[in-house]
Amino acid sequence: MDIILLGPPGAGKGTQAQRLVDEHAMRQLSTGDMLRGAVAAGTPIGREAKAVMDRGELVSDEIVSALIDAELFAMGTGTGAIFDGYPRTEAQAQALDAILAKHGRSLDHVIELEVDEEALVERITGRFTCAECGTGYHDRFNRPAVTDTCDVCGAHSFKRRPDDNAETVRTRMALYRSETAPILPHYEGRGIVARVDGMAPIAEVTRAIDAILGR
Ligand code: AMP
């Protein structure tokens, strides 16, 4: 089963993808995570992408589609993919169709997380992750049970994304509206789009997604 999680920054795509990975042994393919990995490793792609990402703008379609292609190739066919943060443009949506066909796969669901944009700035500026295992937290909505200690791996160091600031978030949201939301009709004609209330508590959103996936 291959699915796309679609929604503006802060809608909860990463959080829900992580849950699907844990519960259904699917694989999260986040172009944002891949690019942050490339930046941290100082690869040529990372060096090219860093300034674009810091401004909240979009990295080139060719780069992100090549990253997805390579990951699917490495993954093999037995595991379902959750596309998180990809595709983000019409060109990427078309590239994904071609890439999936090449790998003998096809999309089962496109799930849009619907959220109130005003809440997103607070969600994004408060989020942080465990520096060791990547588990996501939030200053107000999802704190570790023991202060400064990761619930999952017990580590004590956390990090925040440099692009999770109010100014960059506005750019990322505007790009979601102008470039990403318009790709929905691409999938609507195939009858595979479902919408979920992304403002509901995390566990409720997970239940709604599970129901769509028939699990
Ligand atoms: P994300 O973690 O999905 O919020 O992505 C963080 C940043 O990485 C975005 O603001 C873009 O600069 C870049 N990025 C991630 N995925 C894509 C994509 N599919 N197309 C273009 N740029 C992307």
Image: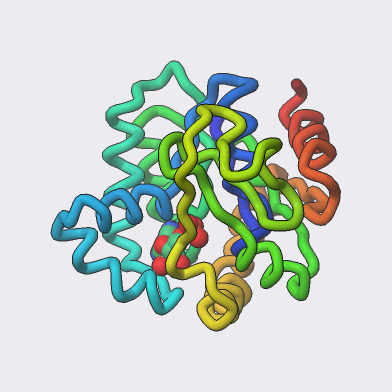
Q: Residue furthest left?
A: 44
- Residue 94 vs 215, above or below: the answer is below
Residue name at image x 76 percent, y 46 percent: 194
- Does the rendering let one see residue 47? yes
Camera sees residue 8: no
User: Image quadrant of ligand 1?
Assistant: bottom left
For the point 16% across and 55% down, the residue is 43
Taking the image as shown, residue 211 lies to the left or right of residue 67, namely right
Name, please, the residue furthest toward the top: 78
Give the x, y percent position of residue 5: 61, 47
Asked where in the image residue 69 lies, by quadrant, the reply is: top left
Quadrant that contains the N terminus: top right
| Residue 214 place in picture, x, y as percent | 76, 24
| Residue found 26% across the figure and 54% down from its top | 40
Judging depth in this view, the residue of 187 and 114 nearest the camera is 114
Percent position of residue 67, x then y: 30, 47
Q: How is the image coloured?
A: rainbow
Residue at the image point whose x is 62% and y is 47% from the top: 137
Q: Quadrant of the C terminus?
A: top right
Vertical relation: 165 (above or below) 131: below
Residue 71 in the figure: left or right of residue 208 = left
Instruction: Give the left or right position of residue 146, taking residue 52 as reference.
Output: right
Q: Nearer the viewer, residue 145 or 70?
A: 145
